[in-house]
Image: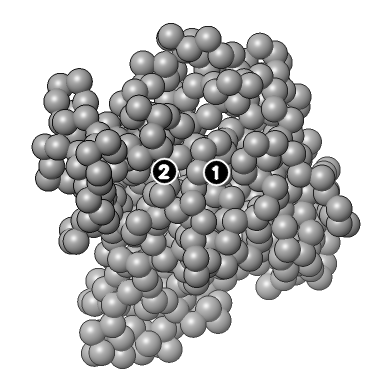
Amino acid sequence: MKNLFLALAMLTTSIGYSQISPDLYSWKINLNGATGYNGIPADVQQIRYSANFTYVSSSGIPSYTIGPWAMNPNLASNQNWTFKIARYPVADPTPATAGNGQIGVLKNGVVLFNPGDAMSYNNQNIWHRVAQYFEAVSFDTSGGHPAPGGVYHYHINMKKLYTPNASEHSPILGYMFDGFPLYGPYAYSNTNGTGGIRRMKSGYKKRNITTRTTLPNGTVLPPNQYGPAVSSSYPLGCFIEDYELSASGTDLDSHNGRFSVTPDYPSGIYAYFIALDSLGNPEFPYIIGNTFYGEVVAGNTGPGGGHITITEPVNQFAPKYLTLNALLQGFYDENTNSMITDTLRVYLRSSISPYSIVDSAKANSNSSGTGSFIFANASNNTPYYLQIKHRNTVETWSSVAVSFVNSVMSYDFTPAAGKAFGNNMKQVDSSPLKFAAYSGDVNQDGTIEASDLSAIDNAVFGFATGYISTDINGDGTVDASDASITENNAFNYVGRITPVSLGAV
C-alpha cells in the first residue's frame, strides 16, 4: 500500500475552532498505519489538545529510510513518545539549559538533541564535545542516529525531512519543548516580514584561540581544567566552548532564534531556525544554543521524559486536508513561471443556497501556487464550493462543488478559466497555460474600481512599503506597476462572480 502522509504546515484558523493553530496542524500524521524502520509505526500517531496544551504521540521513527549507523552499536526502536507542547508559550526570564537528551520534537515525531554528544574532555564537564565532529561518522544519510535505548534523534539538520528552498520561507519543522516553533534555515529578511527571503545567519562564531585555557565568558581556568591545544586532533570548533556570540553580521541570538513574522504567525513569534552555512552545511549551534528561550514544559526532557500522562480533558485533532493550486495575477511572473508566496484563506461553502460558510482555513501558498489547508469542521463525501480570498484579489469560487474523500481533497484552479465559477480568472501565462485570480480589489468589496485606485494612489504618494493591501504585485513597494494592474481590471469591470450572485443551484 502506498504510504499516505500529510505534512500539515502553513495553516491557521478554522471557523468554530478559534484555538486551531500551528501547534495542532504542523504535524506529519500517519493516516493509514504505514511503517518505517524495522516495521515500526512511523511518524506522528495522534494529536490531542486542550485549551493550553497540545499532546503529540509518536513512535520516534520517521517514514523515510534511516540507517545504517557506522561504528554505533545502538538500534532505533519504538519510543512510544507522548510530548506536551505549550500552545501559548512565554519567554523565560531565567532561561533553562538545553541539556542532554531530547529538547524538542520534529513534525514527524522524531526528537532533537542539543549540539553536544553528552561527553567532555577528560570527563571534566568543562570542554563539551560537539556531536557533529565526534559522532558524524555514525550519522545516517538523513543526519540522525540512535542513542542508547534506541532513541533515534538529530543534532543537526534533518536532510530527508526537508529540503531547503532559498526562494521560500522555510516551513515549521517542529517545536522545542518551550513551545516555540523550529523553522528551516530561510526566513523573511526583515523581522516585520519584508525584504524578501534569505538564510538566517547563526549568532555564533569560532573563538580566536590556539589554547583552551579560558571559557567564552572570559573565565580563566586553572591548569588542571585546560582543554587540549588546538590541533589537527582537536581542531577549533570541536568543543562547544570553542564558540562565542558574534557582535555583528548575524540574525539569530544565543538560543539560535529571533522574534519575527512568519507565514504561520503573521503577528510574529519567537522562533528557532536551523543553522546552515552559505554552502548548505550544518553550522553551530545547528538547532539550539545552550539555553531555551521560553519556559520549558515539565515532563518532556531528561531521564524518563517524553512519556506524559494526560490528566486533563482533551480533544482529538482529526481534520480534513485540502491541497489547493491557485495563482494570483499580480504576484505571478510569466518569465519565471512562479509566484511570490503569500497567504490565502479558503472558505468551504455549502453547495446549497444560501451557500453558508461551513469552515475556513488559511495557508501560505508556495511559488507554484500550491498550499495545504486544514479544516476542522468539514465532513467526508459532502460537496462544498471553495471560495478563495486574498488581501487584494477578487474573491474566486470553484466552478463546481467538491468533496473530501478519506479526509483528503485536491483542487487546481490554474489550468483553465473554467476552473473558476463564471470563468472568472485571467490568463497569466501561455507556456505553460496558466490562469490566475484577478488582482486589484484593495478594499475587498468584490469589485475593482475607482476606490481601489484611489487607495493605491494615496499609497504611492506616501511612499508606502511593506506587507500592505495596496501592493498589488507583492514586491513590497506601492508604485505605478500596482496602479497599472488595477486600472486595467477596473476598465474591464472585473468583479466577483459567485453562486450567490448568479443564483446557482
Query: Residue 220: x percent and y percent?
Result: 22, 51
Q: Residues within 10 Å of mark 2 (few under 14, many from 20)?
A: many
Q: Looking at the rendered structure, which numbered label has been put on residue 247?
A: none
**Disc 1 crowd, CA 10 A, few/some/many (<14, 14-19, 20+):** many
Colour scheme in use: one colour
> Mark 2 is on which residue type?
Ile
- Residue at mark 1 to residue at mark 2: CA–CA distance: 10 Å
Circles 1 and 2, Cβ within 8 Å, touching? The answer is: yes
User: Please, what secondary structure does the residue beneath circle 1 have?
Assistant: loop
Quadrant in which the C terminus is drawn:
bottom right
Q: Answer with the quarter of the image where residue 39 lies.
A: top right
Q: Where residue 489 sits: x, y (%)?
A: 39, 72
Residue at image coords 73%, 63%: 52
Q: Residue drawn at (24%, 77%), measured in percent from left and top?
A: 479
The number of numbered badges drawn on the structure is 2
Horizontally, residue 474 falls left or right of residue 149, namely: left
- Left or right of residue 439: residue 497: right
Is any part of residue 245 visible from this angle? no
Which disc number belongs to residue 287?
2
Nearest to viewer (mark 1 / mark 2): 1
The numbered mark, 1 or 2, whose residue comes first in the sequence reads 1
Which residue corresponds to the image point at 73% horizontal and 48% vertical from the top-left?
Answer: 55
Kindly identify which numbered label has been placed on residue 103. Answer: 1
Side of 199 relative to 44 (left or right)? left
Numbered disc 2: secondary structure: loop
The quadrant of the picture occupied by the N terminus is top right
| Quarter of the view holding residue 395 | bottom right
- Of residues 18 and 464, which is closer to you in this image? 18
Q: Amino acid at mark 1?
A: Ile
Residue 318 % position (x, y):
78, 46
Say which of 161 and 402 sits in front: 161
